[in-house]
C-alpha cells in the first residue's frame, strides 16, 4: 500500500535539500558520521484553526527509509556539483561512502490515523547523526502534506455526519504525486471513495464516477445523452443534471430511470454540480420520490468544504445524500502547508552520556524541546482523551504527573496516579529493520474514526474549538527552561 516504491522505481535519495548532503559531508569529513543523535518531527500549530490533526504519511516514510540508497547515477550527478571555487563540492571518498549507504536508525512514531496536536513529536529518529540528518527533508515532505489532507478530510466527513464523502480532487491537485497522496490521505481521514483510478489500483480505495457535462453536450438533447449512457453502462447510472436546466434534468433522469428499471437495472442517483444546492436538492428529491425513485441518491459537488456542507445540512435543509469534494480537499485549499519541523533534540557525547539539545529563538513558538521525547496520552473513565504529556524518556514520567503548558506556565494539570494512559510513539524500525505490522488502509481509516470519537465534541467544532491540553511533564519543562536561560546567558 506504500506509494513511493510503486510510483517511483528509481532511487529517491536526491529528493532532498542540498544542505542535508553538505551537513552529511561535514560529519563524514570530521570523522563523526556515526555519532548517535535523536531528531523529532512535529508541527507548530493545528491546521485549519482546528482543534486537532490526523497523523498521516508514515507508511510512505517507512517505505522510503527501507529503500533509501544512492544509485550510480545519483553519485555521478553529485560528483558534478561545484563549490564557489569551481572545485568539486564532495570528495570522491564521500561519494564512495554513500555508495554503501544503508539506513540503520531506530524510528518510533505515532501510528497513522492517530489524533495529534501541535508540538507533539510524530516521529522520532535515533541513530548515526549522518543518517538521521539526511532524511529530514523527505520525512517532512511525506508527512506534512498527507497529515494536512487527512485532517481536512476528517473535518469534511465530520460535517457530513455519516453521509459518504467522495474525493474528487485529482484534476486540481498539485501534480501527479499530489493527486495520488491526496487520495490516500483523504481516505485515511474518512472519505468513502475517490475518482482517482490510480489511487484505487494502488491502495484498494473504492473508485466512483459516471459522466461529465461534455457527455451531455455531445448529444442533441439531454434525454438522448442519459438514454445513451444508460444503454452503455446500465449498472453505473448517476446522471449529471445541471448542463442546461437542472430540474428538467432531474425529470429526464426519472424518465430514463423508468426505462432502466424495465430492463432490470436501477437508477443510482443524480448529481448536482452548480446553483443553489439546498433548493435544487429539495426540489430534486420531490421529483425523484414522485417518480418512484425514493432510494435514488442525490450527490452534490461544486467547491464544497466542511463549512459549506455543515451549512447545507444544518441550516438549509438540503436533501443531499453524498458529497463530492475536490479542490478544497485535495489541495488543502485554505492552508497550503502544515508547517512541520524536524529538530535535533539530543546527542551522545564521547563519554556515552546523552546531552539534551535545544534551539532558542526570539519567537517563542520556534524554541524547541530537548531530550529523547515521548508522548503519553491520558484517558478518562468515559473513554475520552483528556490530556497529553510530552516527556523525556531519560528521566521518565512519574505519578502523579504534572503537565505544564510551555507557552503559559500558569496553565498546569495534574494527572492522578492510576489514570489510564498510553505512550503514542511506538517502534516502527529497529536498526533500519521494520518491527511493526503495518495495517491496511481500511484499518487506518477505522483508527481515525475511533480516535475522533474519543475527542470531546468541543474539540471537533469548526469555530473556536476547545484547546486540547498538551504540555511538558514537569521535569522536562524544568530542563527546557534551564537550557533556555543558559543559552541566553541568564544565571
Image (tube, grey):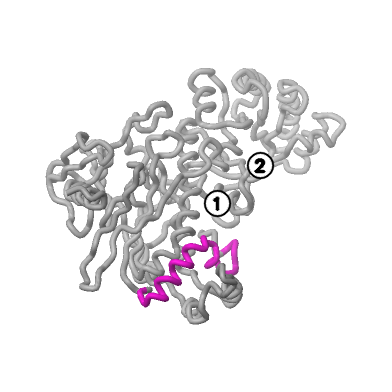
Outermost residue, front direction?
85
Q: Residue, x 55% and y 47% (percent of image)?
A: 182
337 vs 360, left or right, is right
* Marker disc for residue 209: 2
**Which residue is at a point 17% across and 57% down the rendered structure image?**
395
* Above or below, 309 relative to 62: above
Question: How packed is label 2: few (under 14 Cα within 10 Å), some, or many (20 or more)?
Answer: some
- Would you call the spot at circle 1 few (<14 residues within 10 Å), some (14-19), or many (20 or more)? many
Q: Which mark is residue 475?
A: none
Q: Nearer the viewer, residue 412 or 205?
A: 412
First in sequence: mark 2 vs mark 1:
1
Give left or right: position of 468 versus 216.
left
**Can residue 299 be spotted in the picture?**
no
Reply yes or no: does residue 128 show up in magenta. Answer: no
Q: Is residue 275 visible?
A: yes
The residue under the point 60% across, 25% down is 294
Give the left or right position of residue 154, taking residue 216 as reference.
Answer: left
Q: What residue span does the magenta drawing correspond to?
A: 6-32
Give x and y (percent) for residue 34: 35, 74
Q: Is residue 32 left or right of residue 189?
A: left
The front one of 195 and 220 is 195
* Nearest the eye: 73 or 288: 73
Task: Indicate the secondary structure of the residue bearing disc 2.
Answer: loop
Mark 2 and 1 residues: CB-CB less than 8 Å, in contact? no
The structure residue drawn at horizontal position 41% and vertical position 44%, both measured from the top left corner, is: 54
Q: On screen, 450 above or below 15?
A: above
Give how far apart the Cα atoms at labels 2 and 1 are: 19 Å
Q: Residue furthest right?
A: 220
Amino acid at each position: 500500500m506504500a506509494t513511493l516504491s510503486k510510483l517511483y522505481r528509481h532511487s529517491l535519495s536526491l529528493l532532498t535539500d542540498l544542505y542535508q548532503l553538505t551537513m552529511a559531508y561535514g560529519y563524514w569529513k570530521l570523522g563523526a558520521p556515526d555519532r548517535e543523535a535523536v531528531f523529532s518531527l512535529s508541527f507548530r500549530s493545528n491546521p485549519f484553526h482546528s482543534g486537532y490533526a490526523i497523523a498521516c504519511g508514515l507508511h510512505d516514510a517507512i517505505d522510503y527509509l527501507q529503500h533509501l540508497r544512492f544509485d550510480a547515477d545519483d553519485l555521478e550527478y553529485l560528483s558534478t556539483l561545484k563549490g564557489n571555487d569551481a572545485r568539486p563540492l564532495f570528495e570522491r571518498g564521500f561519494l564512495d561512502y554513500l555508495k554503501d549507504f544503508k539506513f540503520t536508525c531506530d524510528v518510533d512514531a505515532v501510528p497513522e490515523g492517530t489524533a495529534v496536536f501541535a508540538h507533539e513529536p510524530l516521529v522520532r529518529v535515533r541513530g548515526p547523526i549522518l543518517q538521521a540528518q539526511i532524511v529530514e527533508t523527505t520525512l517532512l515532505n511525506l508527512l506534512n502534506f498527507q497529515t494536512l489532507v487527512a485532517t481536512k478530510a476528517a473535518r469534511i466527513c465530520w460535517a457530513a455526519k455519516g453521509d459518504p464523502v467522495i474525493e474528487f480532487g485529482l484534476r486540481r491537485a498539485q501534480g501527479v504525486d499530489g493527486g495520488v497522496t491526496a487520495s490516500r490521505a483523504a481516505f485515511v481521514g474518512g472519505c468513502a471513495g475517490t475518482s482517482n483510478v490510480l489511487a484505487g489500483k494502488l491502495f484498494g480505495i473504492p473508485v466512483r464516477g459516471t459522466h461529465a457535462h461534455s457527455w451531455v453536450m455531445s448529444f442533441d438533447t439531454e434525454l438522448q445523452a442519459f438514454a445513451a449512457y444508460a444503454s452503455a453502462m446500465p449498472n453505473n447510472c448517476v446522471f449529471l443534471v445541471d448542463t442546461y436546466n437542472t430540474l428538467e434534468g432531474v425529470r429526464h433522469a426519472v424518465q430514463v430511470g423508468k426505462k432502466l428499471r424495465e430492463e432490470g437495472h436501477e437508477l443510482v442517483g443524480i448529481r448536482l454540480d452548480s446553483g443553489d444546492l439546498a433548493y435544487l436538492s429539495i426540489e430534486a428529491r420531490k421529483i425523484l420520490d414522485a417518480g418512484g425513485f425514493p432510494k435514488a441518491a442525490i450527490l452534490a459537488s461544486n467547491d464544497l468544504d466542511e463549512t459549506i456542507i455543515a451549512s447545507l445540512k444544518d441550516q438549509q435543509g438540503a436533501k443531499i445524500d453524498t458529497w463530492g469534494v475536490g479542490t478544497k480537499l485535495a489541495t488543502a485549499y485554505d492552508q497550503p502547508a502544515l508547517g512541520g519541523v524536524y529538530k535535533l533534540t539530543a546527542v551522545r557525547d564521547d563519554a556515552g552520556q546523552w546531552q539534551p539539545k535545544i534551539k532558542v529563538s526570539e519567537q517563542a513558538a520556534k524554541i524547541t524541546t530537548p531530550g529523547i521525547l515521548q508522548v503519553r496520552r491520558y484517558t478518562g473513565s468515559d473513554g475520552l482523551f483528556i490530556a497529553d504529556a510530552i516527556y523525556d524518556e531519560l528521566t521518565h514520567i512519574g505519578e502523579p504527573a504534572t503537565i505544564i503548558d510551555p507557552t503559559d506556565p500558569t496553565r498546569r494539570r495534574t494527572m492522578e496516579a492510576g489514570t489510564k494512559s498510553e505512550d503514542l510513539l511506538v517502534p516502527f524500525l529497529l536498526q533500519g529493520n521494520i518491527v511493526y505490522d503495518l495495517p491496511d488502509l481500511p484499518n487506518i481509516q477505522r483508527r481515525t474514526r475511533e480516535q475522533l470519537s474519543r475527542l470531546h465534541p468541543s474539540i471537533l467544532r469548526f469555530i473556536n474549538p476547545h484547546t486540547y491540553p498538551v504540555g511538558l511533564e514537569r521535569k522536562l519543562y524544568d530542563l527546557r527552561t534551564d537550557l533556555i536561560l543558559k543559552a541566553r546567558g541568564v544565571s
